Image (cartoon, rainbow, N blue to C red):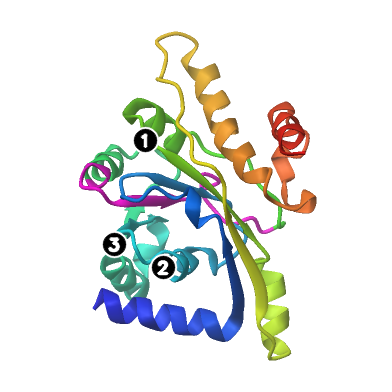
């Protein structure tokens, strides 16, 4: 069933978007790593199944979507985990760790929801905490051009929307410290988000546009 659903998703995406993917060489050969992405529009989640066919993916999804039977059914067959975005969700965290240990690949948007203003919001610390504690490799991926406004506008004109996915260099975070934990967790979260933001157009960088860490990364890339 999953194969059929993914085939249909890819067919739909080909109808509505012209997708370009860069940076496959930055992806590890085996699973058990994290793909951290920005979240601009409703096409972002299915885009993972379009662009990545050599890894067993799973995606955290807001539990509110489980209230809809069709989305709950899709989530089950696409290996999603329904998570509580507003409260500590230890059950979901344990399930993520279990799946990563099995060699699955976590695709997650640290912002937690799509950017309705088309700009990056501040990232939530969950993935930074787990990646630091567990030593997971992180691959930052920038999604460019998937804003709902652009997709809907082009659909009305029977045009496909150009969307570009860019995978940056993989990295790991330092071990989680025993002291200054909140400060370090924020630093680690900002590191993930800035490594995504550096690949985005300036108008999409939002909360991180003036980040000192982003400016360092931009200088390094010149």
Q: Position of residue 31 (x, y in %)?
A: 31, 50
Q: Which mark is residue 36?
A: none
Judge whether 187 appears above or below 23 on screen.
Answer: above
Q: Which residue is mark 2?
A: 49
* Distance of label 2 from label 1 (alpha carbons): 21 Å
Instruction: Please give the range of residues in magenta.
Output: 99-116
Q: Quadrant of the C terminus?
A: top right
In the shown orientation, is residue 92 left or right of residue 166? Answer: left
Quarter of the figure with residue 189: top right
Q: Which residue is mark 1?
A: 136
The reply to whether the magenta stretch includes residue 107 is yes
Q: Nearer the viewer, residue 59 or 85?
A: 59
Q: Secondary structure at mark 3?
A: loop
Mark 3 burial class by Cα count in 10 Å: few <14, some 14-19, many 20+ = some
Q: Nearer the viewer, residue 211 or 72?
A: 211
Mark 2 burial class by Cα count in 10 Å: few <14, some 14-19, many 20+ = many
Q: Position of residue 142 (x, y in %)?
A: 60, 53
The reply to whether the magenta stretch includes residue 16 is no
Does label 3 or label 1 sit earlier along the sequence?
3
Q: Residue at x 69, y 33 (%)?
A: 217
Which residue reaches farthest bottom? 158
Q: Secondary structure at mark 1?
A: loop
Q: Quadrant of the N terminus?
A: bottom left
In the shown orientation, is residue 210 left or right of residue 68? Answer: right
């Amino acid at each position: 069933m999953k194969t059929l659903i993914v085939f249909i998703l890819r067919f739909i995406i080909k109808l509505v978007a012209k997708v370009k993917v860069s940076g496959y060489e930055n992806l590890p050969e085996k699973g058990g790593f994290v793909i951290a992405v920005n979240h601009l529009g409703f096409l972002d989640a299915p885009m993972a199944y379009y662009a990545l066919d050599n890894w067993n993916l799973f995606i955290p999804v807001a539990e509110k979507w489980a209230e809809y039977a069709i989305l709950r059914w899709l989530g089950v067959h696409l290996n999603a985990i329904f998570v509580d975005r507003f409260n500590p969700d230890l059950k979901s965290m344990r399930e993520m760790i279990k799946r990563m240990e099995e060699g699955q690949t976590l695709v997650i948007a640290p912002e937690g929801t799509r950017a309705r203003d088309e700009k990056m919001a501040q990232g939530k610390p969950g993935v930074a905490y787990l990646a630091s504690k567990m030593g997971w490799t992180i691959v930052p991926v920038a999604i460019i051009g998937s804003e709902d406004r652009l997709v809907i506008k082009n659909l009305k004109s029977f045009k496909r929307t150009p969307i570009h996915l860019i995978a940056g260099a993989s990295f790991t975070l330092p071990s989680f410290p025993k002291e200054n934990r909140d400060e370090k967790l924020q630093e680690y979260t900002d590191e993930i988000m800035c490594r995504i933001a550096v690949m985005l157009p300036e108008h999409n960088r939002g909360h991180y546009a003036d980040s000192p860490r982003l400016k360092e990364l931009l200088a390094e890339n010149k």
